[in-house]
Amino acid sequence: MSTEEKKNEERQVSRRQLLRTGVGLIGAGIALRDSPVFASEQPTPAAEGESMVGLKFEPRDTVRLGIIGVGGRGTGMLANFLAIEHVQVHAICDLVKEKTAHAQELVEKAGGKRPEAYTNGEHDFENLCKRDDLDFIYIATPWDWHAPMALASMNAGKHTGVEVPAVNTLEECQALVDTSEKTRRHCMIMENCCYGYNELLVLNLIRAGVLGDLLHGEAAYIHDLRGEIFSDKGEGLWRRAPHTTRNGNLYPTHGLGPVSNYMGINRGDRFDYLVSMSSPAKGFDAYRAANVPKGNPKWNEKYVCGDMNTSLIKTVNGLTIMLQHDVSNPRPYDRINLISGVKGVYRDYPERIYVDGQAGEEAFTAIEPYKEKYAHKLWKEKGAAAEGRGHGGMDFIMLYRLVQCMREGLAPDTDVYDAASWSAPAPLSEKSVAQGSAPVKFPDFTRGAWKQRNGSSI
């Protein structure tokens, strides 16, 4: 191999490391993608003083929206957007034309003008991003597409919301941060669990000092997804693939986002380091043996991601977090959602609380007596409108709050530093597992700005 050939090969390896090439999907259509983010296009780090911390949205009366991906998740979120006043949906993108047409019809039935469709191949989202009549682009596509779509959106001057996890790799985390700072556009992780009734109530309990100084949290995504992941449609078309190449916590943010808010992560504290270990990978093999006929192509897959991944995180201020992930086995749904302080502890699934000095024995009690006083303002004001909507109403509350912040010119509740920090446990857990549970350090995506602010803005 010549010197020039070696250099070309090294450049290609760097590109593959930056954005993993694989099977992608917009909504429910599959396509093989070649990474659209080239080394020459990578943003340079923002200069000192260009942090996105506290940067307010430009106030506007109407939020003009583009949506990339209208499969199951994207369509559900579109319905929530359409239930919020002062929102206009101008553009829809999906590889599956039938899904795009259905989304257009939903907008028209809600009284809006039929949005323009972008269905011309796997990179037509780039044309949507270039429109000059969009304020915010919401991305609900498979994980491998999140980074290139979010980068294209911000580089086109649009504020951006990305479904969870925001990205897969540390390189993608840093690319989001650099681009957000360079373009002065927000990139938010659309973590709906931060807006659940219980999560916001507990946030108010902590602010009021009911649990005292915090010490420890526990978070998880334990969800039996075997049927969905082995399906021949929807997420079944792409979500098994990571289990054949990665071993760690592939989906950390549903549990970690709320606990991060409780602890003020990136707001007076930050993640310092992580250790991680995985159990054997047996659940998918057992499910396949019981449910998939021999000869099906799924029998050619080898699952390497341990069924239960357990990670421990230490923060700079000394707090600890246990973080778990299991989607491969028959277990009841559980995000744990535990937070412990010197005065008491709250734990979900089922919801319960113990506060020092309470009547009775040392036992958990019902959370009901706290609800009237500590229910969050968003749920008091909009709980009725959220009733019956996605995930117990938390989807609606999250989007309502986003629109409120954009219309009133407020800083968003979460920013690009949260998107990066909450997604980073996925690649860091893989690294720790591969190194025999060795500690791995978190980058400081805020470049030190975490020291200058306190508490969640929700």
Image (spheres, rainbow, N blue to C red):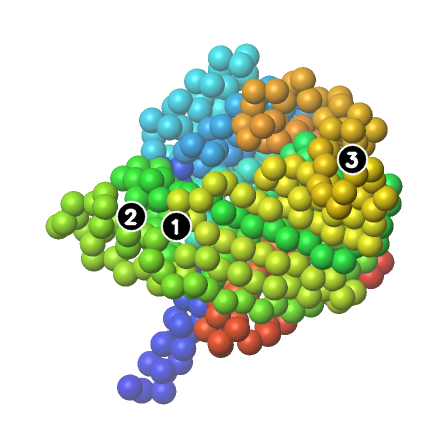
Q: Name the residue carrying label 1.
A: 328
**Mark 1 crowdedness (10 Å alpha carbons): few <14, some 14-19, many ≥20:** many
Report helix, strand or loop for mark 1.
loop
Residue 67 % position (x, y): 51, 34
Labels 1 and 2 touching (C-beta < 8 A): yes
The residue at the point 49 percent across, 13 percent down is 109
- Farthest residue toward the front? 361
User: Which badge, 1 or 3, is on the more N-terminal residue?
Assistant: 1
User: Which badge, 3 or 2, is on the more N-terminal residue?
Assistant: 2
237 sits to left or right of 352: left
- Can residue 406 be seen? no
Residue 413 % position (x, y): 73, 42
Q: Name the residue carrying label 3.
A: 409
**Mark 3 crowdedness (10 Å alpha carbons): few <14, some 14-19, many ≥20:** some
- Amino acid type at circle 1 is Ser
The residue at the point 65 percent across, 69 percent down is 273
In this view of the protein, which residue sits in the foreground, 201 or 62? 201
Residue 388 % position (x, y): 56, 20
Q: Nearer the viewer, mark 3 or mark 2?
A: 2
Report helix, strand or loop for mark 3.
loop
The residue at the point 46 percent across, 73 percent down is 434
Distance from disc 1 to disc 2, alpha carbons, whole Å, reads 8 Å
Quarter placement of the N terminus:
bottom left
Residue 385 lies in quadrant: top right
- Farthest residue toward the left? 295
Q: Name the residue carrying label 2.
A: 287
Q: Nearer the viewer, mark 1 or mark 3?
A: 1
Report helix, strand or loop for mark 2.
helix
